[in-house]
Image (cartoon, coloured by chain):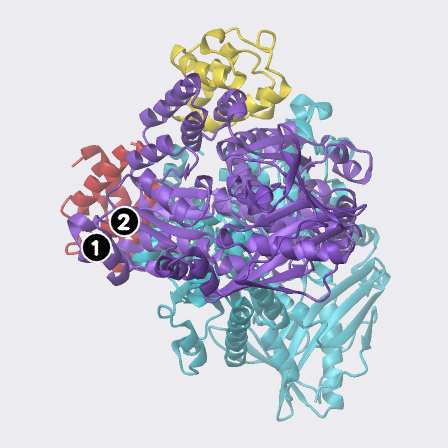
Chain colours: A yellow, B red, C purple, D cyan
Amino acid sequence: MSENLYHRLRPLLADLFQLPADQISPASSPDTIESWDSMQHLNMVLALEQQFGIAFAPEEIEQLVNVELIADLLEEKLTLSGGPQ
Amino acid sequence: MSENLYHRLRPLLADLFQLPADQISPASSPDTIESWDSMQHLNMVLALEQQFGIAFAPEEIEQLVNVELIADLLEEKLTLSGGPQ
Amino acid sequence: MTSNQTRQWRVQAEEYLAEGRARQAHAMLSAWWHENQTLTGASYVLQMAQALRPHLELRPCKLRVLRSCTVEPALQLLRAGAFAGGIDLDASVCPFNAYAQEILDASSALYREKPDVIFLMVSTRVLAPGLWQGPSGSAAPDYARECAEVLASYRRWVETIRTRCNAALVLHTLEQPALPAAGILDMQGGGQTAAIRRINEGLAALASGTPDVYLLDYDALVARHGRTSWWDEGKWRSVRMPVRAEHIPTLANEWLRFLHPLRGRLAKVAVTDLDNTLWGGILGEDGLQALRSGPEGNGIDFWQYQQSLLRLQQRGILLAIASKNNPADALEALERHPGLLLRPNHFASIQAHWQEKSQSLRQIAEELNVGLDSLVFLDDNPVERQQVRLELPEVTVLEMPADPAGYATAVSNCPLFERLSVSPEDAQRTEYYVGQRERSQLERSSTSLEDFLHSLDQRVFLIPASTENIQRISQLTQKTNQFNLTTRRYSETEIRRLADSADHCVLTIRVVDRFGDNGLVGACVLALADGVCHVDTFLLSCRVIGRTVETAMLSAIAQYCRSSGISRLEGYFLPTRKNAPAADFYPKHGFTCVKEDAAGSLWRLDLETATPTCPPWIQVTQAEELALV
Amino acid sequence: MTSNQTRQWRVQAEEYLAEGRARQAHAMLSAWWHENQTLTGASYVLQMAQALRPHLELRPCKLRVLRSCTVEPALQLLRAGAFAGGIDLDASVCPFNAYAQEILDASSALYREKPDVIFLMVSTRVLAPGLWQGPSGSAAPDYARECAEVLASYRRWVETIRTRCNAALVLHTLEQPALPAAGILDMQGGGQTAAIRRINEGLAALASGTPDVYLLDYDALVARHGRTSWWDEGKWRSVRMPVRAEHIPTLANEWLRFLHPLRGRLAKVAVTDLDNTLWGGILGEDGLQALRSGPEGNGIDFWQYQQSLLRLQQRGILLAIASKNNPADALEALERHPGLLLRPNHFASIQAHWQEKSQSLRQIAEELNVGLDSLVFLDDNPVERQQVRLELPEVTVLEMPADPAGYATAVSNCPLFERLSVSPEDAQRTEYYVGQRERSQLERSSTSLEDFLHSLDQRVFLIPASTENIQRISQLTQKTNQFNLTTRRYSETEIRRLADSADHCVLTIRVVDRFGDNGLVGACVLALADGVCHVDTFLLSCRVIGRTVETAMLSAIAQYCRSSGISRLEGYFLPTRKNAPAADFYPKHGFTCVKEDAAGSLWRLDLETATPTCPPWIQVTQAEELALV
């Protein structure tokens, strides 16, 4: 997992799930974060698309089940698109 | 003048003015290139905007009077916009 | 705006919240939100809103969205934007794609919840797939029939909503496909895009022909940003979300444009700076000749900004100036610079001096007789903007872009400037303030208030509610904050019902004086039962406050009551943060207080023993058909 | 497409040019252009075009652009795109913003130069500044009057052009501003955008009511890409160029969509591959069950691609398959896969076997009786595409995107598939080919050609030109290449004039046989003077070639001539690269050659000594009102 990306991701997810940043860890998931329901999951996907200028494929949306997986997929996409790091 | 940028610029201008690339030099200007008339100047401005993803201000368009100046202004814009190098 | 400044706003918002300075916290948060209109930003704003809400005066708004697609993420942004703009939004969606059932079922949640506003947003793709994708077989498509069916459905839905609730209804037009199925042949007529255009025109006619129904041209919104880039095929397939992530804030902002005028959270005055805002350059340093402004050349950004202000004036919004300059120099530049679109007589108030901007804004609010929360402040200088945010957190401070080319867009994107109707009164408002300046001169030259009132030569016309003025009466209830005894807001539909009801009477008044016609500037709603006339609503526009018009109105009402055998007048005074000017209305006119609680006080006047009389300097004329019962 | 491949195309184009293989060089250059649609790319293509032009058969087109703004850069791209697509474009602009003078001055260059096509492209901003920017003062704008004035101007311009020249005229609609001056109030009706919409509807009515006038919905083009991003305020101010650099190729491509149908440079057949093109997956490896195609889920890209092909068929374009597969397996998959939109009977020809794609394309052209340059080849495999480009440079090979999600867009953006009119014949074309397969079976089972022709039971109807068929007659002159004695192309206006002229006669024919109605499949134009009937145009659609219909037509004409006292038939045969099938028409029917030069030969038949007779297996019926003189 890219540390750099994880550290950019943490405050965003903290805002999104209305939690202090220190309560977000790589293992955070819908099981550990109460407000992470399906509507908030969609909000998160769109928020990442907005803020990183990328797009997730329909099948990828279901795979983003914890913070580490999100950071990994994001890194992959940003490397591919040559987008902002 | 950025050498790197100059070397990207040369083949583009060669195509645009329908000349072999070795006839383009930093000093090339409407005085040395016959086909560089005012309409071709506009084509050049738009071609650079298309291919570098930047935009020239109205007052800048008149300043692009030789290849070296073009390379310089382009470099400035690309650095500012953080765009593709 | 640097991200440092942005971060600082967030820190400050949290600090002010901790200090209990809720309005300053709200101002900082609003500035931060302007630069962070994302879903994570919205979550943060809404978290802060939880703590701030109880300490702010927000305009409440209950919104229900009837939709055929997933709009929840846009709604999240709308909630945050509404909070930043001073609206306390209770927004929710009706069950997915069940809009027709919600409308047609008289016992549905839609009607139980009594929303203020309903959005009806249906995707072309869902409602008319044949029009969206073109023919699916070899048979020629019957676009005319599809058109008629779609419009018949909408007509049924609108009529049903209109008979069952008072909410304002915002119809969304159907979006066009990016490329019609038949290619350029479609443009030659009779095709798919012509059919969708016909439906949208039908929707426009339906909206303008039905009270409190409005049109949101969703297709034009999509077109503004590009039909190919707006639609998100992947998200549509997976979660039925039709809008690409980057455009969701745009949709939310378009919705805000409707909520502000519908709930009366509006800017009445646009206050602009001069140097590097209204014109390019600094008058005191560069001199009049060097100032940049004009329809061509290097002053065009400022010309376009002035044009955007002129457009506000055409909607009835007053313009004012707050500038740090020598007054005479500023006035000379405004009068003599050849490239200005706006001149001194475009401005209802000009504050050019060396006091703080916050002070100028206070004076403008006082001079124009509006609340500070009716001002929008436009200034290129971030320091001035920050000063105003902290000193006058009620004022809306627009974040102006660094490049003047963006000024006009910043103005036209501010939802507080939107209007859904403009009355003749609105369009003449600036003229009124020119008259007002002359009135003030008369007032200064009069030896006493009575002299002044006599010389004004006022005539007051009492006019019953009718088709011609219902819109204005509704507008008066929406917008009047100061001289307003009960501050009850009524939609056009509600006013119409009250006017049609046998036991209610709805009146408006026109005031004409020697300087001109002030238009329809007052309204009252009376409920009549058991020999009592209950004053439900009694209000006067700030234009005529302090001119004893309210006494004339009251005396006319009393006279009618007596002639109709009504012996008692009663009414509440419900205090708000704004309506202090009306607080002594009842006691001053001899009413006695019969009840008082946290919400307000109830007042009574026995018409058999007391008679409010009309001031001798006002002549009251009643329309003949006026009858209370 | 990698930039390596792109570079290679350029190298190859130059190598083939040096080797004198002009058509291969053109195919490589076209592929390169598809990936390099920029202004520098256009300059390069046009430089190559200088050397290639003399060695290619291009469709000539003379275009004049009447414009209120700078369009020259877009025209440069149009020239390159036209050359890549097989059109030899002579394009120029009329003097800047002098469109009205050019139209109204009968002696202007516009009329002297006799263009084939005229574009009339006027900016809203220039023609109707009040509608573009909204009211500029406090007076209420009179949109209805502006609307009427704009439409009256257009009406005058169109009428004048129509009386003075035969060129096809393409009107551009007026674009809408991104944000109306009145904000959301404008959407509530009666505003600026409604006025522009009304003008555009007026233009649509004007175009559809006037022959050879077409509508380019410029506003829809702008909306497709975003009204805010399309307009370039900076370039407008400095050089009056209204389109942002990145969108100029889009405008040029939209123009190409019109030039192709207007000049008859059209695709008649779309030939598609199967594996990973029509469906996802490889039939031979993955098996039928694993193939991806369907209206939902992971096969939707292929479903949408099939939908784009179906849309072509609705315009009269035939579909065909060229696939490397076992024939029985391919047919089984086409018939039985549950998620396919297209089935075997959607395809006029199915070539599924293991021969080279170029061979399949040759067979399709032969089977469907069209030229190779009427084929467009759609294949996901770049190697196959390259093979076809080199073997059959006449075939248009579309560069398919790597992601199947882009297939449908690639099809709908190809200008060879555009049509400006679709006749009932076009829409039934596929059905005809099903009938044709049955005819072939009959032919194979017949013992002799005469047997076959007898059993076909043909009836030929001669029909004079009239309002109902003028469009089809014009289309036949535009599209018929093989059995066409003179290959003269006529617009609808020209056909109408010829039909109305006292010394001309325009006829069309309908052929019905036992397998159905073949529709209007032939036309001739006769000039009558001094006892001589000169055959100006005589053509038969490839649908009925080889069935002696031409002899029946000729005998009917001869019979009429004699009954009208005309004693001599005369006509040119003008050879082209395509019309060999008609080369022996005159000698076979007893005409003698009286003149011959580089352009062609003149043939004569003396009706007093010779009588062409109708074949016994054809019954000719003449419409009663038919009279030659």
Q: In the image, is residue D139 above or below residue C154?
A: below
Q: Secondary structure at mark 2?
A: strand
Subunit ID for the residue under disc 1: C
Image position, residue D327 (x, y; %): 71, 34
Q: Which mark is residue D227?
A: none
Q: Nearer the viewer, residue C385 or D498?
A: C385
Which quadrant, please, contains the N terminus of chain D? top left
How far separated are the C-alphas under marks 1 and 2? 9 Å
**Which amino acid, mark 1?**
Asp
Asked if residue D265 can be seen in this view, the reply is no
Residue at x 33% of width, y 43% of height: C360
Q: Point out the image quarter for the C terminus of chain D.
A: bottom right
Considering only vertical position in the picture, is C181 above or below C187? above
Whether discs 1 and 2 lie on one chain: the answer is yes
Residue at image mark 2:
C352
Q: Which residue is mark 1?
A: C329
Dot 1 alpha-carbon crowd within 10 angstroms: few under 14, some 14 to 19, many 20 or more: some
The reply to whether dot 1 and dot 2 touch (C-beta < 8 Å) is yes
Q: Position of residue C96 (x, y in %)?
A: 71, 31
